Amino acid sequence: MSKVKISFNLNYEDIVVEVESNKRLLDMLREDLNMKSVKEGCGEGECGACTVIVDGITVTSCTVLAPQVDGCSVITLEGLSKDGELDKLQESFMEAGAVQCGFCTPGMILSAKALFMKNPKPSKDEIKRAMSGNLCRCTGYKKIVEAVEIARDK
Amino acid sequence: MKRYDYFSPKTVSEALDILENANNDTHIIAGGTDIVLDINKGRIEPDEIVNINKLQELKYVKCEDGLIKLGSTMTFSEIESDELLNKKAKVLVVACREIGSTQIRNLGTVGGNVVNSSSAADSVAALIALDASVVLKSKNEERTMKLIDFYDNGKSKIRKNELLTEIFFDEPNQNTATAFTKLGRRKALAIVVMSMGALLEKDESNICTKAQFVLGAVSRHPSRLYEIENQIIGQEINRDNLYELIDNMSTTIYKTIVEGSPGSLRRLNSAKYKSKSIKGIAKTTFESILSDLEIK
């Protein structure tokens, strides 16, 4: 029984997948489902680069086993640009100049997205706290927080 | 990586049936924030993984028979936002709130934190301050033991065929306050350097009727400070009396660390640092309690 059949909703579409039981959610998303926006940073749940939204909350996909999302809804960055239109967060990150190398960006945007799903008008402190599990080595965070505030106010 | 068989039982009863046939390489996964790393780094090589994250029976916080009971797969985020716990068990809420990051709190469970037995387990320190107990179920047996007795020098006493289903503690009365202070290197994603959990109960004349103090990350497992508790029980709870305990706490920490690893220079430096930093940590903790008990 080392391959497991799971059904879940990926980016608003129901799918059924057979996956090796020892794959992480991160690996299944990148390798089997071609969701390349999900990045592996530390592989230890400490950097947030691999963040995805499962059942409305952010998780580090490198610490989740793929079969565990059976019956769940999963959102990656690809799910934010439906029909080619960008989510307001994606726009604001560009507007604010909050992207340098871009590696942390998918995780950052999803953390902000999950925050908006619970609290559409967060304060600056609430934004910082919600995103404290996403590390960035390039920007110094200021423009990232500004980007989220711009999206909030749109 | 070795392939393993994966089970995702839908009920506790199903899970216990599976665990009845557990061998040494059968492992339970809930949030996965510890075990997935263990697997990937080769620290364990499971034959079987039993996913308990779908067991709704283990997700609850309730008050029953004078006890507050938590299901073992409550995540740190769920504990952080629980109304009853915010009112009655601030020590646990604060401890869980400061674990890891948003993502880790969304995944990590209190049961996993307890069984993983890390010396840095923040929720364990808080639960010991509440004098909590754990319930261990197997197919044919149910055991209950105090959390402080659950560890044996780095390992937990859970058996391979058991599931930690519930954690409970006495419901604090309205003359009780609890607090938790964590010292870490940064505001998030910080492994604890040292922490303190406290519970103080008083009577109408502000005399202390119960004191439970815990230090985290000083000894191998969070430890109670029984001698220091006895110094305040029967005394009036006020700033002077509480602050007077701090020197003793400092000495106790120094002794515990140095005697735990005699001759180690690294541990000597740790003893020097922690015995000093407790002064700030204890003051913060005591001020929180004084404020909650409305003692000026």
Image (cartoon, coloured by chain):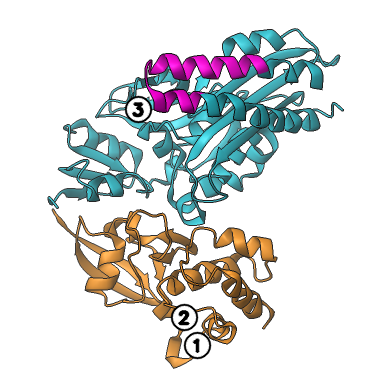
Chain colours: A orange, B cyan
Q: Gap in Å between the C-alphas at discs 1 and 2? A: 7 Å
B90 over A74 or under it: above or below: above
Query: Can residue B267 be found in the magenta stretch?
Result: yes
Q: First in sequence: mark 1 or mark 2? A: 2
Tag 2: amino acid: Leu
Residue projecting furthest to the bottom:
A84
Disc 3 element: strand
Residue A4 image position (x, y, % from top left): 19, 59
Chain ID, mark 1: A
Depth check, mark 2 against mark 3: the one in front is: 2
Which stretch did the figure color magenta? Answer: B247-271
The dominant secondary structure in magenta is helix
Residue placed most toward the observer, A115 or B5: A115
Q: Chain of mark 2?
A: A
Residue occupying image coordinates x 33% and y 47%:
B10
What number is the disc on residue A86?
1
Left or right position of B12 against A100 = left
Q: Position of residue B37 (x, y in %)?
A: 30, 48
Disc number placed over residue B137 in the picture, else none: 3
* Residue B158 sits inside the magenta stretch: no
For this view, does A84 lie left or right of residue B138? right
User: In the image, residue B201 lies at what x, y percent?
Assistant: 72, 19
User: Are the residues tagged 1 and 2 within 8 Å (C-beta)?
Assistant: yes
Rendering quarter of residue B229: top right
Label ID, residue A80: 2
Residue type, mark 3 in image: Lys
How far apart are the two marked residues, 2 and 3, measured between alpha carbons?
Answer: 43 Å
